[in-house]
Amino acid sequence: MVLGFGEAWSVIDVYVTTLLLFLSVMVIYAVIFVQKKQPETVLVWFLAVSLAVLVWFLAVVIYPLVFILLFYVYLGRDLRRRKMFQNKKEIDRSVSMALGKARESLFVSDPSKHGLGPYESLARMLFKSNVSFLTGDNEVEYYNEGDRIFKDMIEEIKGAKRFVHLEFYLIRDDSLAKEFADVLAQKAREGVEIKILMDAAGCHKLPRNFFREMENAGGRTAHFLPSLFGDLNIGINNRNHRKIVTIDGDTAFVCGCNIGVEYRGEGPLGYWRDDCVRIRGSGAISVEKRFILDWNFATDGHLKIEDYAPTRPGIGKAGLQIVSGGPDKASRNIEEQYVKMIVSAKEYVYIQTPYFVPSMAVTSALVVAANSGVDVRIMMPSKPDHPFVYWASLYNAGDMLRSNVRIHQFQKDGFIHAKVLVIDDEVSSVGSANFDHRSLGLNFETNAVIYDAVFAKKVKAAYLDDVENRCTELTAEKYNERSRTVRLMENISRLYGPIA
């Protein structure tokens, strides 16, 4: 078959157009990675070019039906979830109103009466933005090692008389999780109400019959936002990243660790640093409120907060608020909490985080604090568990070094997974929220904000002990000596920041 002049020119035109498109894209990508622009700006250009190439590819190569299917599976799912979150707000409101009726007996209605001093405005903001009730009768215990966390958690569960509720992003199929399963099954046989809420993505590898013995004894499990298509379509966004345990209405744990042997230092990353706070007092009912809201949403259940109220008064003196954030909220509550705490500091801000990919608001708050003479320090890993996030974190650490922030990298034979913020020997935050965009806006998170000098000093002492014995400081000189390969990885990975 011989092509005519017009047909031949059409074929040449397609090849030339394709070649020019390819060369143009390569040039634009090269400019994107070299220029030192803000990640948000670069990401917009990167996505715009990528989208143009994708549209061309889909229109020319892929049959339109495939595109329609992908559109439904991914975008359609997000639209469905938006409506679900709107419905969740209505369900949440009823539980919050019921809990609000108990304010006079359980909660400090006026923060000024609890002696919070300069942090009274923080408490008021958290209540107005997040309906975070302030309680003042809490006994709080700080943990930063998995062995102690899990040992005391299991002991508290063994002593339960009424109910045990657990909510975790990840539960491994390993010896530690089996220990929990055995204890929970025994409590269920004793007549204690057991409920476990697991994230569908985090626990998708956990066998469906893992808690069968407990379920046969009357306990219940549920999965948060399971996919309609099973493991083939589990999204990475809108995940329930919370780690909480409530027991009998008067004891609760708010943690950064999941249930798995690596969280007590038995995994490939070695020695493990994590965070947790045990709450005994009225603050536990606020944690229970969080569980009930999530359980009712995940199961279409109708648990009532009144049925899980504490049966004994708190005997501590620590003030406490439970702060939760997620894509179902109109505002970014966790981000607001972090920003307000940072700008409230007068002496120091100490942060522990496995992933340092902060929003512009958090970055600005840290820079302003450091340039105002506040001792700002950030502790992060010296090795990655997620490479792209690690390189993006290192890039952001370089920015912090230029703003008088000190960076400490946790030991090379261990890993830091803690999400801790402490300021001025007065206020501490312990919980599940990382300093990245995923925790600040995309996922469901919960922190405990604790107003107690004794607790804050314990957190500070543990932090400084790690600085002295388990960290090396990343100075501006060391950072500037990094190789070209490292610089390239940082420049590529920093584009991941806005979606990390």
Image (cartoon, rainbow, N blue to C red):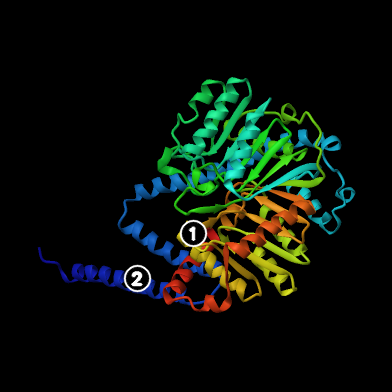
Question: Mark 1: which secondary structure?
Answer: loop
Residue 395's place in the image compared with 436, above or below, is below
Position in image of residue 475 (x %, y %): 58, 75
Q: Residues within 10 Å of mark 1 (few under 14, many from 20)?
A: few
Residue 331 placed where, x, y %?
Answer: 68, 52
Name of the residue lying farthest toward the right: 113
**Residue beneath the point at 85% across and 35% down:** 105
| Left or right: residue 235 compared with residue 218 | left
Compared with 223, 266 (above or below) is: below
Which residue corresponds to the image point at 30% horizontal and 57% vertical from the top-left?
Answer: 61
Residue occupied by mark 2: 21
Q: Position of residue 183 (x, y in %)?
A: 56, 29
Residue at x 77% of width, y 42% of height: 139
Picture quadrant where residue 40 is located:
bottom right
Tell whether 391 sits left or right of 83: left
Residue beneath disc 1: 413
Which amino acid type is shown beneath numbered disc 2? Leu
Name the amino acid, label 1: Asp
User: Which image quadrant: the N terminus?
Assistant: bottom left
Which residue in the rendered view is the most extreme toward the left? 1
**Closer-to-camera residue (478/57):** 478
| Lower sequence index among marks 1 and 2 | 2
Residue 227: percent from left, percent from top: 47, 39
**Which sits in the foreground, 343 or 213?**
213
Label 2 sits on a secondary structure element that is helix
Instruction: Between label 1 and label 2, give the one nearer the viewer.
Output: 1
Residue 125 shows in the view: no
Residue that extends furthest to the front in the rendered view of this protein: 469
The CA span between labels 1 and 2 is 47 Å
